[in-house]
Image (cartoon, rainbow, N blue to C red):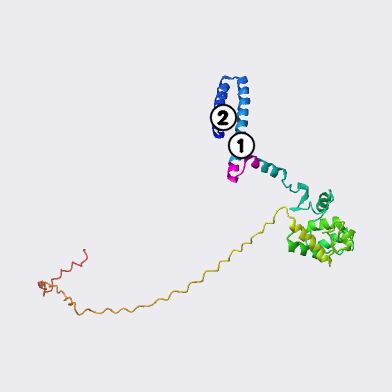
Amino acid sequence: MNIDYLTQLLTNRLAALALSKDQAFQSGDLERINLLDVEMAEVENTLSQLRLLSNITIAAAVANTTPAQIVSTGLDAVQNIVQGPSAGAVINGYDISAYATDPLYEQKVQGILDAMPAFVTAEDIDTYVQEAAPGSPVTGAMILAAASENLVDSRLMMAIMRNDSQFGTQGVGARTNNPGNVGNTGTSEQMYPSWDEGVRAGAEWLSRHRAVAPVAQEIVIEPVPEPAPTPAPKKTRKLNIKVEEDPRVDPIPPVETPIDIVPVEEVPQATTTPALPEDPATTTPS
């Protein structure tokens, strides 16, 4: 029977069971609800198996092989999964699980790192190194230069060198200019021509064993806007406009307004002197 047809039948059956469950909820039939839950789980499980079989068949057709071969290939892939580093083997973003065979190596390095103070200058590192291992040939300048060249954690470098050789004063690392014991496996030794190169070897090893790739930070420099130039004062140009009369236009004749002259009558002037009134009496009554 066709797989797609069976899948459709079971899908319809699942929808019918869901409807029956809703009806059982409405009636409060708990026993019926439990039975329906069990049956629905069985149908869903069968549906999942059918869908898986359908996908395997499709994959086999695309790869021009058999479904059995597809299943066999999948099982091999699951069994041969490469296990990543454990959480304890990754310190500050570096996988040091392959650095040494000591099963407690990561714990020891982490313990040294946890107790290590922060450093600001190469002189601070020199002080720490000489306090931990007096007479050590390893200097802060060597450590910072190697860490800067390889973009690695300088404090983790120091923790490894202290654990492996007490900064080049003990063990195989002391006689091979190899404070981090890079390549010193117990059966073979890795000699470096100088302590500077031995320190750099440890930084290069960490650079090749990052658990997380470093993120390059892009520095964006915004251009500084230039001040706007001061506008030059505008020059004014005086225009001498001479208006010339157009000879083709006749001049406008002056308009004369007639003035009416009204004759003024002469007023006759008196030529006699008016009589003066008589003086009143000036006598004193008796």
- Where does the image place residue 179, in percent across and percent down from the top left? 84, 60
Does the rendering let one see residue 67? yes
The amino acid type found where label 1 is placed reads Leu
- Where does the image place residue 152, in percent across and percent down from the top left? 75, 59
> Depth check: 245 or 87 in front?
87
Bounds of the magenta segment: 58-70
Does the rendering let one see residue 118? no
> Depth check: 4 or 194 in front?
4
Dot 1: element: helix
Q: Nearer the viewer, mark 2 or mark 1?
A: 1
Query: For the stretch drawn in magenta, what is the main secondary structure?
Result: helix
Dot 2: element: helix
> Depth check: 23 or 132 in front?
23
Mark 1 lies on residue: 53
Mark 2 lies on residue: 10
Crowding around mark 2 (Cα neighbors within 10 Å: few <14, some 14 to 19, many 20+) is: some
Compute the Cα span from label 2 to label 1: 15 Å
Q: Confirm whether the magenta stretch covers residue 3.
A: no
Crowding around mark 1 (Cα neighbors within 10 Å: few <14, some 14 to 19, many 20+) is: some
- Quadrant in which residue 117 is drawn: bottom right
Q: Quadrant of the N terminus?
A: top right
The amino acid type found where label 2 is placed reads Leu
> Depth check: 140 or 117 in front?
140
- Where does the image place residue 123, in percent across and percent down from the top left? 82, 64
Q: Looking at the image, is 185 positioned above or below residue 67?
A: below
- Quadrant in which residue 276 is drawn: bottom left
Q: Confirm whether the magenta stretch covers residue 69.
A: yes
